[in-house]
Image (cartoon, coloured by chain):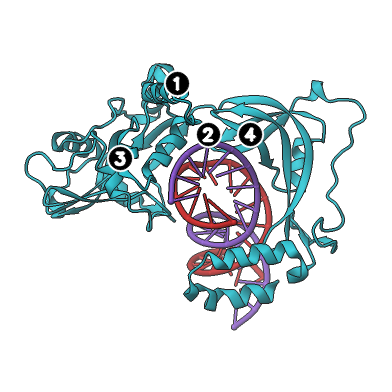
Chain colours: A cyan, B purple, C red
Amino acid sequence: SLRYEHGLLVQGATRGDGSVGEDVTANLRTLRAIPLRLRGDAPDVLEVRGEVIMPRAGFDAFNARALAAGEKLLANPRNGAAGSLRQLDPRVTARRPLAFFAYGIGVIEPASLLPPTHSATLQWLRTLGFPVAPEIATAQGFAGLIAYYRRIGAARDHLPYGIDGVVYKLDRYVDQQALGYVARAPRWAIAHKFPAEEQMTVLEAIDVQIGRTGAATPVARLAPVQVAGVTVTNATLHNADQIERLDVRVGDTVIVRRAGDVIPEVVRVVAERRPPHTRPWRMPTHCPVCGAQLLREKGASAWRCSGGLSCAAQRREAILHFASRRAMDIDGLGERYIEDL
DNA sequence: GTTTGGCAATCATAAAACCT
DNA sequence: AGGTTTTATGATTGCCAAAC
């Protein structure tokens, strides 16, 4: 998010949790794609929402250079871009091949300057000096959206930057307002993702992790495999029911992908590759950390360690959890949770 | 007035790369 | 070691309205 007051860039922040992010103003100022001063008549206050990206060509060139210089390579453009913005020294950021696309407006004062539609807003942002993705388009009806999805999907490999899908938005702000929000998610916009890259690997073990509330979560230990730019070695299996649904066993060859191109996920078992003498996986009867019994409440699918705060894993997670909250919150929530445990 | 069902919202949990 | 980015899945909680 970029904040302009009377046409001048005064602050840039990461998205964070939606209300609190990091101040990366000094780093954002080094991006040529981000105007320090707005063109034409500027609102008193304007917050521009956008995305910092690292184009493929820049990423490749950066890594070629780093390789020649014997320096560390970036693993993928996405994390490379995120890391570039968190640099303490803006001069480092300045040397990273970063680009920027504006995709919306947050605060605007006076509000009367806001155009009536999203598409008109993006046009206006162009006139103010912001880059806007050239692939945007307006479409009508379900068929129009799917046609757009297919068109962008066909062009995907030829785009100068990586994308994981398209976003549909209602164009008229009055319509957006009528639909409103569910929690923080708008009802007037939805992402339509392209199928994620899938890879095959071997599930070498299933470990059980104990969380703060005692929940026993099975985790797949996988033979390392490159998926969508990273090395995947672990993936959650969520619970015993999920393992049963997948019928996944230790030793199985499995298909993995990165859900949302981020979170590793076991999709399915390659049945014809199952080695002989495998056995269905069973949840252990006792906590692997403290040895207390694992119990499951009626109707629930989660098994929990009955050790409470005498279990080292639960103590550890409880301390980490409450340490990351503000002191104020600990008073209200801490007691309740500790009693529960 | 209490219970129940349905829906929405939130919590809990998992992982990888990069940076400090 | 911990914070930052990204998100799927299921469990739990909370609320409202309908049924009893």
Badge 4 vs badge 1, beta-carbon distance below 8 Å:
no
Q: Residues within 10 Å of mark 3 (few under 14, many from 20)?
A: few
Where residue A72 appears, x then y in whole percent? 49, 31
Q: In which quarter of the view is residue A141 placed?
A: top left
Are callouts 1 and 3 both on one chain?
yes
First-in-chain label (4 vs 3): 3
Residue type at numbered disc 3: Arg
Q: Are marks 4 and 1 on the same chain?
A: yes
Residue designated by label 2: A261
A256 displayed left or right of A122: right
Q: Amino acid at mark 4?
A: Val
Mark closer to the observer (2, 4)? 4
Q: What whole-number distance in Å separates the C-alpha atoms at marks 2 and 4?
A: 12 Å
Callouts 4 and 3 close, C-beta under 8 Å? no
4 or 3: mark nearer the eye: 3
Gap in angstroms between the C-alphas marked 2 and 3:
30 Å
Does the residue at mark 2 contact the one at mark 1 (Cβ under 8 Å)?
no
Q: CA distance from mark 1 to mark 3?
A: 21 Å
Q: Is A82 situated left or right of A119 in this image?
A: right
* Residue tagged 4: A232
Earlier-in-chain disc, 4 versus 1: 1
Q: Provide the secondary structure element on which disc 4 rests.
A: strand
Q: Residue furthest left?
A: A41
Q: Residue at x 84, y 42 (%)?
A: A281
For mark 1, what is the residue? A68
Q: Which residue is found at the position 22% from the left and 36% from the top?
A: A122
Which residue position is annotated with label 3? A91
Q: Amino acid at mark 2?
A: Asp
Q: Identify the mark nearer the N-term, 2 or 1.
A: 1
- State which mark lies toward you, 2 or 1: 1
Mark 2: give few (<14), some (14-19) or many (20+) Cα within 10 Å: some
**Residue B4, relative to residue A224: is it above or below?**
below
